Image (tube, coloured by chain):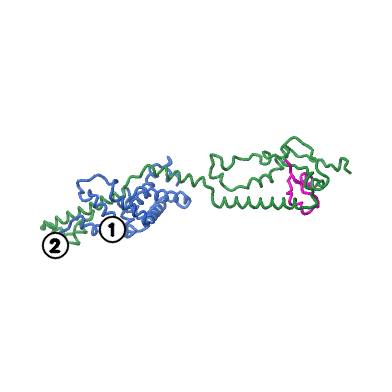
Amino acid sequence: MLCKHYKDALIEAAAPGVTPQRELRAHLAECASCREALAQEQSLFAAIDSGLHAVADMKVPPSLLPRVRAAVDEVAVAPPRWGSTWFALSGAAVAVALVLAGGIRHNDPRTPPTNTATIRPPVEQVIPGRRTPLSSAGLEREDLIPRLPVSVAGNSSSPGGLASSKSMPEVLVPRDQEVLLARYAQQWSSHKRAPLVAQGADEVSVKPLEVAPIQIAQLDVKLLTEDGSK
Amino acid sequence: MQELVLNQPVSTARSELVRELAYRVAQGVLRNTADAEDVAQEALLRAYKSFERLRDRSRFRGWLVRISFRLALDRLRSAKRREQRDTLWSQPTHLPPPVTAEDVAASNQFQGHLERALEELPEKLRLVLLLSAMDGYTIEEIAAMVGVPIGTVKSRIFIARKKLAEKLRCYANTIKMR
């Protein structure tokens, strides 16, 4: 039989791990040319395998690990997208509420622009036990879980901060704000919660209460009407 | 998962294998160290982000192989990268030293032809052939990673080798029939 008939069989037999069939083995035993062809074909496959190993078994560059670590660190530091969105929405809602409350107060024609005593709780006491700011070092992924904005936390926690103080200063309030302050004091004593200024602004026809930068540890309100303003 | 990516002391050897796997798959497609490093980093980063979905080890390796391969192919198709890679082909500094038993493979020219022929293989054949060329992975592991039966892996390897041999035979100057 001509050697051409063994061409495909030779190619297949040259692959690693393949044993030539009996007929091919018999032909190879008596045909030196095909033996040489098989050897060359095996050499080709060996070259291919060697080249493939050179491609596939490349040594990992040592710079890969620091790069991956840095990339993972970036992911860990970056806040979640939904968290930042929630934070922005909360901040925007609070800002709108404050602007509306301020607009109501300032647009009220019955309110004189001056002569108002204001009470503002100290900033450090507004947020008792407040943690490190988000931008500080040592930030963890848990720290990036969206929290209430600082302004909202201050509103909700200010009574506790005030109540925890020991000094009890007196507050002088203009006559036209006495009713509102009285309501404030009444709610304060009954619910231990600070009413929102904006809630009472529409209901009462008096000037809204503003808060001044006075260092007050604890608020103790004495109504002027009881002392002699009658 | 994080220790797999970041080489925590929990499983140093395993994490090295994972990084090697991502890098070598990318390198097998791109044959460019910088590009392969970029792709491996991206693949490992995606694996890190998909932490919860990748607890199973066999699934994780298969996922990593596929994403590395896909990212590498995407990058390979970029015309700019192709141009850069062609210039690098003329300076193959990463080739192993010549082996006397494999004289043909010792030729850098043959290696270039081989890499081009590899690039022309169908994706399915190329991925399986690359994985089989890596040290340390059995046919069973490759089948698990790629998600096909063992017989399919064997046949793909055989067909891929045969296709490469057909394309490279003229360069190796073999098989002279009478």
Circles 2 and 1 on the same subunit: no
- Disc 1 marks a residue whose amino acid type is Ala
Instruction: Please identify which colour was used for chain B in the image.
Output: blue
- For the residues labelled 2 and 1, the Cα–Cα distance comes to 25 Å
Mark 1 and mark 2 in contact (Cβ < 8 Å)?
no
Q: Which residues are magenta?
A: A183-212
Instruction: Name the residue tied to disc 1.
Output: B160
Task: Supply the letter of whichever chain is green.
Answer: A
Q: Which mark is residue A3?
A: 2
Residue A190 included in the magenta stretch of the image: yes
Please tell me how crowded label 2 is: few (under 14), some (14-19), or many (20+) other residues with Cα within 10 Å: some
Helix, strand, or loop for circle 1?
helix
- What residue lies at 87% left-to-right and 42% top-to-bottom? A229
Placement of A167 over or under A81, stated as above or below: above
- Disc 2 marks a residue whose amino acid type is Cys
> Is residue A209 visible in this depiction of the protein?
yes
> Is residue B146 visible in this depiction of the protein?
no
